[in-house]
Image: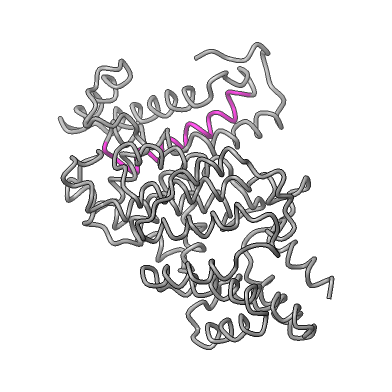
Amino acid sequence: MSLDTSDTSDASDVEAAVAAAFQSEWGQVVATLIRVTGDWDLAEDSAADAFTTALERWKRDGIPRNPGAWLTTTARNRATDRIRHAARGTEKLRDLALLERDASGEVAEPDEVHDDRLRLIFTCCHPALPFDARIALTLRTLTGLTTAEIARAFLVPEPTMYQRLTRAKRKIREANIPYRVPPPHLLQERLSSVLAVVYLLFNEGYSATTGADLIRQNLSGEAIRLARLLVQLLPEPESLGLLALMLLHDARRSTRVDDDGALVTLERQDRSRWDRARIAEGLSHLRATPGPYQLQAAIAAVHAIAPTVEATDWAQIVALYDDLLHYTPSPVVRLNRAVAVAMADGPAAGLKLVDELVASGELDGYHLLPATRADLLRRQGASAAAAEAYREAIALAATDAERAYLTARLDEL
């Protein structure tokens, strides 16, 4: 492992470097350790040890030029130490032998896809696991989100999420679910779950559910990289649709926050700064074949090619949401459709649909419901009701950036 030329590093620089490495490397380190040991808890514990060690060692020895390699090697060494310490029989000694072989590069790949993180997603998306557990386990292992953070994202108590994750890991171990991308004839049955997990990973990066920052660029970039691999593996319309959708959203990334990290909504974004190469690539993946990702990509495409919010073809977007509801009749899609209806037919038409969602209780606790209602009330001139809705949204928002944005809109009333 090569180190930086400086003998020691400033503490704040090291903390920043470790934080950056955690965001970019956690998933790779854990995925590698799971492949080698088959022990999910050991992989996570050893990875956590490696990051803790980095805080100490990098101050003394300098920040390594390749933090990912340093962390993977350190985590592997930690796992070796733990297995050696706990070795009581041939099974543990076998794990130790596997680790030592992996360190020398002698372990054969278990499939034709040489990407540990993609293998991890396919393993997490095994049909034997409940759908919620697949997503939660992927978030835990690939992003390093804490159990508490994932629990908040799912709107469930932390002990419930802890039990869900524990059961999922136990199921993988007891059912001996292989850690690999499945053979071609089994790919199709897992595709919808894998696409959903990759899109959720992108969304966690595009609009974080917790924390101070609205955007976690490394997660969005990782999701796009995985989607490109999926397109190579299964170049079907929905795989292409997911890649198109993420590229079209990501094209707007640099304009979604200002220099101070504050949220900038679509209507206030500088469209001249949108990434035209990303948009062109996204448009090239659109197909006429209907499906939830192709339809969402088509909606994103209408936004991407519109010169202004006012010139956007909102009627077409409403029609696309109508088609999308046939595939995904979720309350979130209905909320997004209500926004499009408000833009096409006026705020009163959209507010009627939003109030139906409020009455249904299906989105209780979802901050974008009162935020949308507040915006529509504001556009109608109902300032007092809008203020009340903004306060409700602020109380529910999970990120500092969103709370700051909503507070600013409340102050404007």
**Location of residue 234 with respect to 159 vertically, above or below:** above
Q: Position of residue 213 (x, y in %)?
A: 65, 50
Q: Residue at x 46, y 55 (%)?
A: 147
Q: Position of residue 85 (x, y in %)?
A: 31, 30
Which quadrant holds the C terminus? bottom right
Q: In the visual, does 41 lie left or right of 330?
A: left
Magenta-highlighted stretch: main secondary structure? Answer: helix
The quarter holding residue 64 reads top right
Quick check: is 42 in the magenta stretch?
Answer: yes
Q: Nearer the viewer, residue 302 or 118?
A: 302
Q: Which residues are magenta?
A: 38-58
Q: Position of residue 72 (x, y in %)?
A: 43, 27
Q: In the visual, does 369 lie left or right of 6?
A: left
Q: Residue at x 64, y 56 (%)?
A: 306
Q: Residue at x 45, y 37 (%)?
A: 225
Q: Position of residue 395 (x, y in %)?
A: 67, 72
